[in-house]
Amino acid sequence: MLVLPPNKPENTMKKLVMILALAAATVGVQAQDKDHKDHKTPQERAQLQTGRMTKELSLTTEQAAKVEAINLKYANEFEAKRADQKKEREAKRAEGKAIRDAHDAELKAVLTPEQYTQWQAKKEAMKAKQVEKRKSTHEMKKSE
C-alpha cells in the first residue's frame, strides 16, 4: 500500500494519477469482456467511471465534478485513438487485399486454367484451416 504524508500537492497528484491509472485499467479489462455492439460514448464511459470512483472512494461533490471532467478528457482521447487504430487497420486490410489481388493476377497469367483452379482450391483449404485453428484457439482461451 502506498503511504504518503498528508496535504502535499504533489502527493495528492500522485494519488489521483494512481487512481486514474487503476480506473483506466479496470475500464480496459471490462471493455474487453463486452460485446462490440455495446460500445458506449466517451461521455457515458466517463460518467460510469466517475460513478464507480465516487462510490468506491467516497468522493465529495466537488471532487466528483473534477474527476468526471478528467475522466471525460481521457475518454475522448482514448476514443480518438481507437478511431485512428480502426482507420489504420482498415487501410492495412485494403493494402493487403490489393497485394493479394495483384499476386493472383500475375499467377493467373502464368498458370494454366486447371493449375489456377487447383491453386485457388488450395488457398481456400488453407484459409479454412486457419479459421478453424483460430476458432479452436479462441475456445481454449475461453475455457481457461
Image (spheres, rainbow, N blue to C red):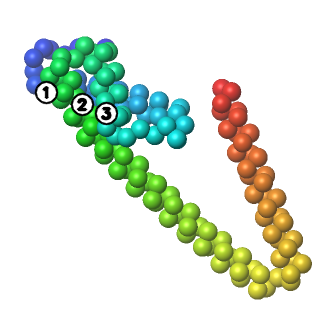
Q: Mark 1 falls on what kind of element? A: helix
Foreground label between 3 and 1: 3
Which residue, as the protein is rendered here, is positioned at the far bottom? 109
Q: Secondary structure at mark 3?
A: helix
Q: Residue at x 22, y 17 (%)?
A: 59
- Label 3: which residue? 46
**Height in image: 57 above or below 132?**
above
Is residue 30 visible from the viewing direction of this image? yes
The residue positioned 31% from the left and 30% from the top of the image is: 47
Q: Identity of the amino acid at label 2?
A: Glu
Q: Is residue 25 above or below residue 136?
A: above
The residue at 65%/78% (across/down) is 102
Give the left or right position of residue 39, taking residue 139 as reference. left
Task: Tell me where residue 103 appears, x and y as whole percent.
Answer: 68, 76
* Quadrant location, the N terminus: top left
Q: Which residue is painted at 17% across and 23% down in the image?
A: 63
State left or right for residue 73 relative to residue 122: left
Residue 135 got which mark? Answer: none
Mark 3 is on which residue type?
Ala
Q: Position of residue 143 (x, y in %)?
A: 68, 27
Q: Which residue lies under the disc numbered 1?
A: 10
Dot in front, 1 or 2: 2
Q: Which amino acid does the dot numbered 1 rest on?
A: Glu
N-term mark: 1 or 2: 1
Q: Earlier in the sequence, mark 3 or mark 1?
A: 1
Give how far apart the Cα atoms at labels 1 and 2 are.
20 Å
Task: Tell me, for residue 68, which label it has, or none.
Answer: 2
Q: Quadrant of residue 138?
A: top right
Is residue 138 shown above or below 7? below
Q: Label 2's element? A: helix
Please tell me which of labels 2 and 3 falls first in the chain.
Answer: 3
